[in-house]
Image (cartoon, coloured by chain):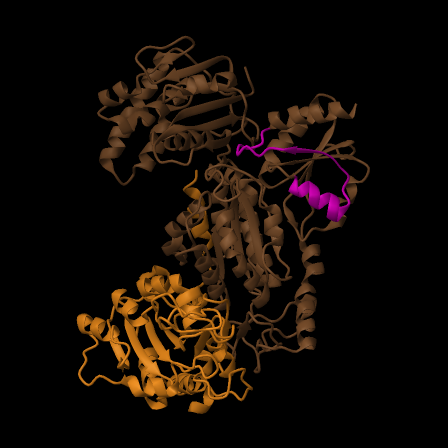
Amino acid sequence: MTGDFQLTRETAWCPGCGNFAIRQAVAQALSACGLQPQQVVLVSGIGQAAKLPHYLNTNVFNGLHGRAIPAATAIRAANHELTVVVTTGDGDCYGEGGNHLLHAFRRNPDITILVHDNQVYGLTKGQASPTSDYGFVTSLQRAGVKNEPLNPLALAVAMDASFAARGFAGDLPGLTALVTQAIRHKGLSLVDILQPCVSFNKLNTYAWYGQRVYYPERHDPADRGAAFRLALEWGERIPLGVIYRNEKPLFEDQFGALAAGPLVSRPRPEPVLLEKAVAAFY
Amino acid sequence: MPDELNVKLGGEAGQGLQSVGLILGRLYARSGFHVFANQDNESRIRGGHNFYQIRVAAHPVETMGETIHLLVDFDGKSHRLHASELAAGAVVLVDAQRAGPGETALPLLDIARAAGGGDVHRNTVAAGAVAALTGQDQETLAALLAERFADDANAREINSACAREGYRAGMATGRRVAPPPPSGPVRRPFLNGHEALSLGCLAADCAFMAAYPMSPSTPIITYLAGQADTFGLVVEQAEDEIAAVNMALGASYAGVRAMTATSGGGFALMVEGLSLAGMLELPVVVVIAQRPGPATGLPTRTEQGDLLFAIHAGHGEFPRFVLAPATAAEAFSMAVRAFDLAERFQVPVIVLTDQHLGESYFTPEPFPWGDVTVGDHRLTSAAPPYRRYAPGPDGVSPLAVPGTVDAVVVDSDEHDAAGHIIEDAATREAMVLKRLRKLPAMRAALRPPLRRGPREAPDVLLGWGSTWGALCEAGEKLSATGAPVEVWGVQELWPLNPEHFTPLAGRRVTVVESNATGQMAGLLSGRAGVPVRHSINRFDGRPLSAGYIIERFKEARGHDR
């Protein structure tokens, strides 16, 4: 089954990049969900993570830097029979497109947002990202990053996201299971994926993450308070898995126009409707 | 008796001028008159000074009148502010117990209270009085109010009582300023440019609209949101204009007709998205309702300052259409056309309106619903492998809907025919040429400018978009004084087709625009070799009127001698 989404194409990723495992996890998860390539749209912006859709066999909307979420939201609105997955990076999603993420939490479209979070800008050659640790030294931030890092999971819990999780590119089986859950979840799913950047992040390496990540044994993702405490945990120990889950109405379910079926297959409005609309102006 | 009636309602924001104006405009339209109404509003919610002006005639009118026959002063300063516009013998109704010189007192609040109403009903009293003074049928007014308050029995009762008492008080003044009787019983809709444009979007089978509120474009999304459930639309208020345009593109990709609307400042935020539409070759309609800039400018006023911006917006090189409707009727038909052109050529189409067109009311001839043909340029299926950017006639590739073919791949990076990211020089060059190959066919698809008046006239007054009504009236008046002038209105203006302008060779062309730098004049002289003799530019935020054009045209011609 996995074969359906696999595509043999030369990638523009560095050897050893965490993106390879993420691609594998996405392909396996889509197959595990019983989906065919025609039923899926991968939506992305710009960055190395945003190239992922090109390396799988399915529908692709690779748009602008930071703007994958609005496009993905509208793709669902236009055809809610499609499974829509955003592949994005920490710069793309939390920096350039941060405003869209905030409002996506509020809208709650049934999309899955996979953030390849390597805590650094790769494609522009190693500048700080919104999730870079305080003091992280780069070619641009020579004296170290002066800003506090953005905490995507705490943000998601604070915004009452429908599904918030953290995965690790160094744990393919765990990541695959997590992405599968995220895709199956009805509502907006955010999966922040720790993704070592072998070229520009010499701090947050496979080993660095490997020593810290763990799956909490007893955590109820429905408990928002517990989820917030877990989301704040960072440093010596970094929790993985589903941090918060909250079933709530979908964006798509709140449009009368979509009750009868996808917008894309709606019949043209009858001329009599237009005549009635004009009649209101007499 | 003048051959038309001009009524001006002056007052503060929040006094309900628009409500009175709408009722009166509809009253005259329902009685068979041609009506044009324009409004002048300050960017505030309460206070200040606004006006609403209604022109009523037996003949078609598509621009404002410039001599006021009836002024209703709601704020105690309208008389002073508009004294110079009054016709000899004009009636000035003041909301007061006692009238000043040249005024007729009409204590609106007292009348409203006596009829069981309050402060908010002063405007209904005024509507009744104006109807009486202008010789209109009381029953028609009563019917309009009953329809307007159909859902609220209490409001219906109070408003009809206030209108009745206002009518009685109006009759009791003994003054009359009736328009000449209408030529026939034809009833026309009374609607503004943005309402007509919105109806056109519905007729064009637009299914998705996302926008961020910005004056003067907001009424478009507001109207469409109100129709969403009836017509089966998804209408979403975006968090910003960047989201709005990217949403429209996402919806377009997924297979539905999609649009957004904004003003210049919001369009500035959309520009990267416009370029994305160019690269992905996705149909999308973007309405720019122009207002004076730069930056925040004059938010509630009018300008045609974004022509060059619309034509050049977006990094990189890609084709787009720019259309500028002249009237409400054209706003309707051009919206239909915009969606069709966008889909046929898989390009963004910008529709340039402005505050004046959008918020002015017209009485177009009954809309030709039966004539609306909506093309469908999307594939329903294709044999695998589907290639989104496969070569096609005029550079247009087959456009498939995700889910109906093996895969639809679109990419903002330069891409190959399958839509996948590439780096090689040969593919890049081929794709640039493929996109630009659309231009000759796009140019050929554009309609030539509108023309009115004597075709042999040595003088030509040329404008674009919303100035058409004022231009035509200026042209007619000038021609009637023995100096024949032909009027041109460029409405489908990009990609510019120089052949459309060859009849201007050897003539004295005066270009009239609501901007300071003569953007159309520059385009025509630079790109079409049009010999522009004079430019008339208005950029104070107020609409061009026939009188303004005539005065400056005479000045300019005076310099020629």
Residue B152 appearing in the image? yes
Tell me: A143 left or right of B466: left
Q: Residue at x 67, y 68 (%)?
A: B432
Region of the chain picked out in magenta, as a range:
B518-545
Q: What color does chain B have in the rendering?
A: brown
Q: Is residue B380 visible?
A: no
Quarter of the image that includes the C terminus of chain A:
top left
Q: Is residue B183 magenta?
A: no
Residue at the extreme right: B506
Furthest-top residue in this view:
B101
Q: How many marks can you see?
A: 0
**Residue occupying the point 58% across, 65% down:** B377
Question: Where, quadrant-wise, is the N terminus of chain A in this rendering?
Answer: bottom left
Percent coordinates x, y for residue B441 in the rendering: 70, 60
The location of residue A165, given as percent across then percent down, is 30, 77
Above or below, A212 against B486 in this view is below
